[in-house]
Image (cartoon, rainbow, N blue to C red):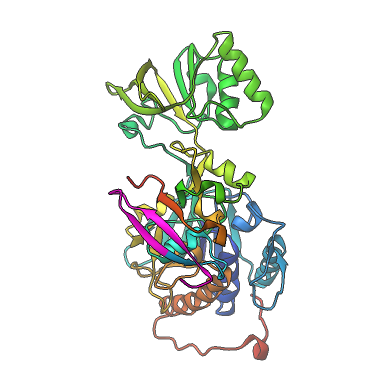
């Protein structure tokens, strides 16, 4: 694996996991990367924590993510079906610490 | 009635720049926006944030960009209808479009340009079985307009944000029975409101149900019962209710635009990149609200789209008339 790549896993609705290799040196957020991989994410607001359509549930590696900002928290808090491990993918910039992260698109089951 | 060449839905940066591009071709614009001021997201959400990717401006504050765009459009005397939302769009045979707002304002135009950005912010609806059949006066509402209508009734409020807390406090004295349902066991609203709600629950004035979500609603023509499910035990419980108010914040939606038979792809309007026209002749979509292969949601791309749209709109309005492009550096900007 290239030095500037990390491994991410996305849990599919059938429970299987897809492994992806994501670059950390392009300034991409998890939302932008998942969209680039053609996952069905609307991201209506374009990454400004305004719409919560890029919500993901973090299954493994939650502790490696940077703490959420007030904006992210406030937006997540409006979701009726929020889980304790839900995050906004647009607010998570890809970095080395996120290697091995396992996520599931919120509400994709 | 307002009559114009181009009706622009949305007064964000891209809609505002379209005034200038259309103006160079001697077309008049009228802009309509649901927000009470121009500028869209830039003025409403991040007026003080710097933007770094406007060509020629290493950095510019969002509100500054909007002020400059307004200045740039001034020679072309655009019209504005602010604080109103376009509800209806009709085409009169082969002729003009007629747009109607929620306040009854009527705008007649030769061309319609949708520059609606994210769309309108509408109340977020939870996924609850049967919810929609009780909308429109049958018990389920997503906002509270007249609290008095709930006097003496049985009511359920769902949500844990400030508006859910504030309405619970306000309505506790008005309604007969009030239940507040929240998915978590704590609230993150203003501490003062949280304390008041807790006190109301302790004194028995309201019924507070924590760690629970709405699961289904039932009734016979009108809402009668709300079923809740506990998050951990998954145990279900029922509450008799005349009204249910889910308060889960706002999320951007296309709104009435969705009903206009435009080709929509994932909440965005499909356009032809030759001129940013939609599948309906005379209707264009520019800026963040449109979609095409390799679309980038950038203000600068919206500016480009506004320029191409204007030239196409000119041809649409003046079929057969040949237009030669003139540069502003050669001809200047002539007011009209």
Location of residue A47 by image quarter:
bottom right
Q: Is residue A16 magenta?
A: yes
Q: Nearer the viewer, residue B73 or B124?
A: B124
Residue A39 in picture, x, y percent from top left: 38, 59
Looking at the picture, does residue A56 appear above or below residue A81? below
Residue B127 among those drawn in magenta: no
Indicate whether B323 appears above or below B187: below
Asked if residue B5 can be seen in this view, the reply is no
Q: How far from the left and from the top, in percent, is residue A8?
A: 44, 59
Which of A42/B1 is in front? A42
Position of residue B71 in the picture relative to residue A36 (left or right): right
**Closest to the observer: B229 or B304?**
B229
Give left or right: position of A38 versus B308.
Answer: left
Question: In the image, what residue occupies the spot 58% across and 47% down?
Answer: A72
Vertical position of residue B237 compared to residue B292: above or below: above
Residue at image location 56% in from the left, 54% down from the top? A91
The part of the chain drawn in magenta is A1-20
State the image coordinates of residue A82 (x, y, percent, origin top left).
46, 38
Is residue B199 visible to us here? yes
């Amino acid at each position: 694996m290239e030095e500037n790549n990390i491994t991410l896993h996305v849990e599919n609705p059938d429970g299987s996991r897809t492994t992806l290799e994501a670059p950390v040196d392009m300034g991409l957020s998890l939302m932008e990367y998942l969209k680039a991989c053609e996952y069905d994410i609307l991201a209506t607001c374009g990454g400004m924590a305004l719409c919560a359509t890029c919500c993901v549930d973090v299954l493994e590696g939650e502790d490696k993510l940077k703490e959420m900002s007030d904006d992210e928290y406030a937006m997540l808090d409006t979701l009726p079906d929020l889980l304790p491990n839900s995050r906004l993918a647009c607010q998570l910039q890809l970095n080395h610490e996120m290697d091995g992260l396992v996520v599931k698109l919120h509400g994709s089951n | 009635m307002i009559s114009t060449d181009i009706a622009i839905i949305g007064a964000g940066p891209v809609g505002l720049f379209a005034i200038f591009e259309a103006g160079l071709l001697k077309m008049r614009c009228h802009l309509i926006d649901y927000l009470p001021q121009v500028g869209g997201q830039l003025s409403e959400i991040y007026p003080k944030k710097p933007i770094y990717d406007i060509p020629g401006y290493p950095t510019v504050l969002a509100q500054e960009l909007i002020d400059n765009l307004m200045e740039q459009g001034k020679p072309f005397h655009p019209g504005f209808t602010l604080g109103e939302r376009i509800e209806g769009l009709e085409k009169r045979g082969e002729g003009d479009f007629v747009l109607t707002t929620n306040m009854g304002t009527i705008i007649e135009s030769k061309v319609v340009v949708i520059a609606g950005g994210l769309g309108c912010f509408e109340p977020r609806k939870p996924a609850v079985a049967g919810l929609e059949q009780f909308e429109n006066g049958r018990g389920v509402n997503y906002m509270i307009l007249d609290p008095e209508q709930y006097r003496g009734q049985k009511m359920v409020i769902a949500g844990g944000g400030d508006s859910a807390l504030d309405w619970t406090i306000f309505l506790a004295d008005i309604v007969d029975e009030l239940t507040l349902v929240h998915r978590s066991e704590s609230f993150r609203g203003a501490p003062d409101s949280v304390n008041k709600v807790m006190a109301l629950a302790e004194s028995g004035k309201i019924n507070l149900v924590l760690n629970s979500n709405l699961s289904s609603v039932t009734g016979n023509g009108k809402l009668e019962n709300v079923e809740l499910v506990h998050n951990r035990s998954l145990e279900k419980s029922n509450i008799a209710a005349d009204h249910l108010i889910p308060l889960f914040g706002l999320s951007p939606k296309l709104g009435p635009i969705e009903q206009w038979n435009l080709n929509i792809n994932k909440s965005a309007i499909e356009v032809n990149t030759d001129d940013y026209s939609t599948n309906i002749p005379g209707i264009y979509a520019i800026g963040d609200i449109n979609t095409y292969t390799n679309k980038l949601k950038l203000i600068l791309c919206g500016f480009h789209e506004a320029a191409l749209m204007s030239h196409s709109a000119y041809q649409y309005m003046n079929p057969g008339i040949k237009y030669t492009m003139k540069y502003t550096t050669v001809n200047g900007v002539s007011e009209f």
